[in-house]
C-alpha cells in the first residue's frame, strides 16, 4: 500500500479545506455550484428526468466538505472540522430551501408516482452498502492522484443533492413521511462517506506530518466513535424497511401467482400486482364476462391470504379478427 507523503497531504488539504488566501474564491465557487445544482436537481425531480438529476449530481460540490470532515478527523484539525461541518449543514439547508421554493410555485406537488421521488423516499440496507463502497472509492481517489479521474463516477454513484431536493419538494407538497425517507437516505450517504473515508485514510496512513507541531484540538477516537454511532443509527431503520419491503414483495408475488391462475381459467390476464398503504391492487384484463371476484377471495383464503386487503381493477377487452 503506497504511503501518503507530505506533498500528498498538502494536495489533499488544498482540495478539501477552505483555508488560505484562496478561501473566499473557493467558497464562492462552492456556493455557486451548490445553488445551481440544487436548481438542476429540483427541476430534474419535478420533471421526472433521470438525465437532469445525474447532471445535478456531477455539478454538486457537497462531496468536498464531507471528505473535508474525514480528513479533519484523521488529522485532528478542529478548525477545518468545524468549517466542513458548517458547510455541509448550511449547504444541505440551502438545497432544501431552494427545492421547497421551486415546489411552492407548482400547481401540483410531486408524489411517490414520480420515479425520482419513489427512488429516494424508501431507502434500504443495500443503499448503505452501496454508499459505503462509493465513499471508499472517493477516499481512495482522493488519496491516490493517479486515479482521481474516477471522481465524476463517484459523484454519480453517491446521491447527495437529489435526496435533499426531494425533501424540500415533498415537504412543500405536504408529504412529511416521504420527506423523512429522503432525509434518511441523505444521512445514510453522508455517514457512509465518513465511515469508509476514515477507514481508507487510516489504511493509507494519513496523519499529521512530523513538522506539524500543532497540538490535536480533539480526540480522534471520540470523533470516529460518533461516526460509527451514526452509521449504526441509520442502519436500524434501513434494515427494518428492507425487511418490510422484502415481505411485501414476497406476499405480492404469491398473490400474483394465485390471481394469474384464477384469471387464466376465464381467459383473462393479470396485468400488474402492486401494493400501496397496505392494500394489494390486482389489475387484470380479458373478454366478457369477467371472472368472479368471490372465487379469487376464496382462493386467496385457501393460500393463506384471507386477511389481505385486495382491490380488483377489471378492464373488459373486446377482441376482433382483422379482415383478410
Image (spheres, rainbow, N blue to C red):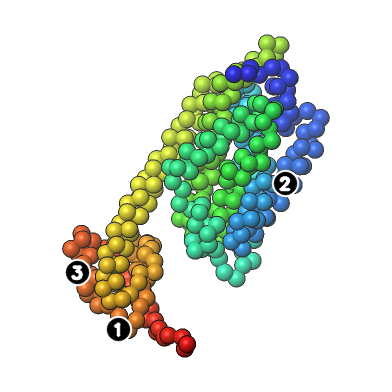
Expressed as whole percent of the image width and height from the top left, the position of residue 5 reads 69, 17
Q: Is mark 1 on a helix, strand or loop?
A: loop
Q: Is residue 35 left or right of residue 107?
A: right
Q: Residue at the spot x=77%, y=42% of the render? A: 28
Q: Residue at the spot x=64%, y=55% of the render? A: 51
Sequence order check: which comes first, mark 3 or mark 2? 2
Q: Is residue 278 left or right of residue 108?
A: left
**Residue linked to disc 2:** 33
**Residue linked to disc 1:** 289
Q: Residue at the spot x=53%, y=25% of the render? A: 199
Expressed as whole percent of the image width and height from the top left, the position of residue 239 reads 39, 42
Q: What separation in Å lies between label 1 and label 3 (alpha carbons)?
A: 19 Å
Q: Is mark 3 on a helix, strand or loop?
A: helix
67 in relation to 103, above or below: above
**Residue linked to disc 3:** 298
* The furthest residue to the front: 324
For the residue carrying disc 1, how many other residues have a C-alpha within 10 Å: few (<14), some (14-19), or many (20+)? few
Amino acid at each position: 500500500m503506497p504511503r501518503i507523503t507530505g506533498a500528498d497531504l498538502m494536495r489533499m488539504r488544498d482540495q478539501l479545506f477552505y483555508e488560505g488566501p484562496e478561501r473566499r474564491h473557493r467558497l464562492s465557487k462552492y456556493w455557486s455550484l451548490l445553488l445551481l445544482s440544487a436548481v438542476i436537481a429540483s427541476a430534474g425531480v419535478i420533471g421526472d428526468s433521470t438525465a437532469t438529476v445525474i447532471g445535478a449530481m456531477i455539478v454538486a460540490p457537497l462531496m468536498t466538505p464531507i471528505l473535508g470532515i474525514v480528513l479533519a478527523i484523521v488529522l485532528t484539525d478542529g478548525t477545518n472540522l468545524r468549517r466542513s461541518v458548517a458547510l455541509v449543514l448550511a449547504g444541505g439547508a440551502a438545497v432544501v430551501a431552494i427545492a421547497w421554493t421551486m415546489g411552492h410555485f407548482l400547481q401540483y406537488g410531486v408524489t411517490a408516482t414520480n420515479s425520482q421521488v419513489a427512488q429516494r423516499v424508501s431507502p434500504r440496507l443495500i443503499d448503505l452498502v452501496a454508499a459505503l463502497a462509493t465513499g471508499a472509492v472517493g477516499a481512495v481517489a482522493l488519496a491516490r492522484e493517479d486515479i482521481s479521474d474516477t471522481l465524476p463516477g463517484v459523484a454519480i454513484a453517491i446521491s447527495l443533492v437529489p435526496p435533499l431536493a426531494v425533501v424540500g419538494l415533498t415537504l412543500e407538497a405536504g408529504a412529511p413521511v416521504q420527506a423523512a425517507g429522503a432525509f434518511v437516505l441523505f444521512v445514510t450517504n453522508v455517514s457512509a462517506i465518513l465511515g469508509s473515508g476514515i477507514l481508507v485514510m487510516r489504511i493509507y496512513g494519513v496523519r499529521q506530518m512530523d513538522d506539524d507541531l500543532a497540538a490535536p484540538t480533539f480526540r480522534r477516537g471520540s470523533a470516529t466513535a460518533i461516526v460509527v454511532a451514526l452509521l449504526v443509527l441509520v442502519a436500524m431503520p434501513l434494515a427494518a424497511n428492507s425487511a418490510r419491503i422484502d415481505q411485501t414483495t414476497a406476499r405480492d408475488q404469491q398473490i400474483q401467482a394465485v390471481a394469474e391462475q384464477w384469471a387464466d381459467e376465464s381467459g383473462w390476464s393479470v396485468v400488474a400486482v402492486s401494493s400501496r398503504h397496505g392494500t394489494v391492487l390486482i389489475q387484470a384484463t380479458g373478454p366478457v364476462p369477467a371472472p368472479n371476484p368471490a372465487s379469487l377471495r376464496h382462493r386467496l383464503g385457501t393460500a393463506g391470504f384471507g386477511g389481505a386487503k385486495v382491490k380488483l381493477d377489471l378492464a373488459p377487452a373486446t377482441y376482433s379478427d382483422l379482415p383478410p
